[in-house]
């Protein structure tokens, strides 16, 4: 029986790319997301390669997540890897004029949703890790360099990703001795639907963000995720920061009084 990967936010961007990458290696897929049409399209695409189970799910709804996990068919029940990919950024306004609603949505999705999925799936991951063919069961959390390097307008988004980083480290300590690994992948400048969502459908503004640069692509991050998961079971990548060559950290700013 093939290994099972459970991917949240699988309908676009990093999540869809991860689904395709794991499918190429013969993994069985549990794909979740909020957009049923996209989920069905991806399921139809990848079912020709591997077994695929799709479920419409909002990670912010604990009862819904629990129901999806409880209803996993037998061939998908022994989850080997959880990829906590669902997340978003909204707006780029300074804190003093940012939308409270946007802040709450980012907190609910990037923090609450990730912790809900992790807590509900952990018993299955621990059980899988204890089986002879389940060595190296893994939780992969998608963070961001925004959790380390602040930038104007990053406020709550960056704070949620700092939470992802610290939660991943603390999770490792709680899972000590279980055989379950925890990895936090922290991408930098990346081109996907991320910016289109951030700017609420303003395609011109999203496109301008990438003008003249060669950003990371979803396939780059999917390759990184798969690499971390496919390492020997005694190897844990705690945190992996990934930037495109065109990006680097900047200097601290000084405000000078006139």
Image (spheres, helix red, strand yellow):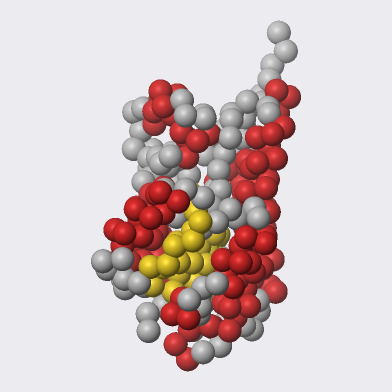
Give residue 197's position: percent from left, percent from top: 50, 36
Q: Is residue 38 left or right of residue 106?
A: left
Residue nearest the observer in this picture, 2 or 72: 72
What residue is rendered at 51% in x and 56% in y?
56
Give residue 131's position: percent from left, percent from top: 51, 89
Residue nearest the observer in this picture, 81 or 101: 101
- Quadrant of the image containing the N terminus: bottom left
Report which quarter residue 10 is drawn in.
Answer: bottom left
Report which quarter residue 50 is drawn in.
Answer: bottom left
Give residue 52's position: percent from left, percent from top: 38, 68
Give residue 183's position: percent from left, percent from top: 54, 65
What residue is rendered at 29% in x and 58% in y?
45
Q: Is residue 69 left or right of residue 216?
A: right
Q: Residue furthest top?
A: 258
What residue is rendered at 55% in x and 43% in y?
88
Instruction: State whether residue 69 is above or below residue 133.
Output: above
- Quadrant of the image containing the C terminus: top right
Instruction: State whether residue 56 is above or below residue 120.
Output: above
Q: Residue furthest left?
A: 48
Instruction: State whether residue 14 is above or below residue 170.
Output: above
Q: Is residue 9 left or right of residue 25?
A: right
What residue is rendered at 51% in x and 78% in y?
77
How many numbered marks, from 0 up? Answer: 0
The answer to whether residue 106 of the structure is visible from this angle is: yes
The answer to whether residue 231 of the structure is visible from this angle is: no
Instruction: State whether residue 212 is above or below residue 34.
Output: above
């Amino acid at each position: 029986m093939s290994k099972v990967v459970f991917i949240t936010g699988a309908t676009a961007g990093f999540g869809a790319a991860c689904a395709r990458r794991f499918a190429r290696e013969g993994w069985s897929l549990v794909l979740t997301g909020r957009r049923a049409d996209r989920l069905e399209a991806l399921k139809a695409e990848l079912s020709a390669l591997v077994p695929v189970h799709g479920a419409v799910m909002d990670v912010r709804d604990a009862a819904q997540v629990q129901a999806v996990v409880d209803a996993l068919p037998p061939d998908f029940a022994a989850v080997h890897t959880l990829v906590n990919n669902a997340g978003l950024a909204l707006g780029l306004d300074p804190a003093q004029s940012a939308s409270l609603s946007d802040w709450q949505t980012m907190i609910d999705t990037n923090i609450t949703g990730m912790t809900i999925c992790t807590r509900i799936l952990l018993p299955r991951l621990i059980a899988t890790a204890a089986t002879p063919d389940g060595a190296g069961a893994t939780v992969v959390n998608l963070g961001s360099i925004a959790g380390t390097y602040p930038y104007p307008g990053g406020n709550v988004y960056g704070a949620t990703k700092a939470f992802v980083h610290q939660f991943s480290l603390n999770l490792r300590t709680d899972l000590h001795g279980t055989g379950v690994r925890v990895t936090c992948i922290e991408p930098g400048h990346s081109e996907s639907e991320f910016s289109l969502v951030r700017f609420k459908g303003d395609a011109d503004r999203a496109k301008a963000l990438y003008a003249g640069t060669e950003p990371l692509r979803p396939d780059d991050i999917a390759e990184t995720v798969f690499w971390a998961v496919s390492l020997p079971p005694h190897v844990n990548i705690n945190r992996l920061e990934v930037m495109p060559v065109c990006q680097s950290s900047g200097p601290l700013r000084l405000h000078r009084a006139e």
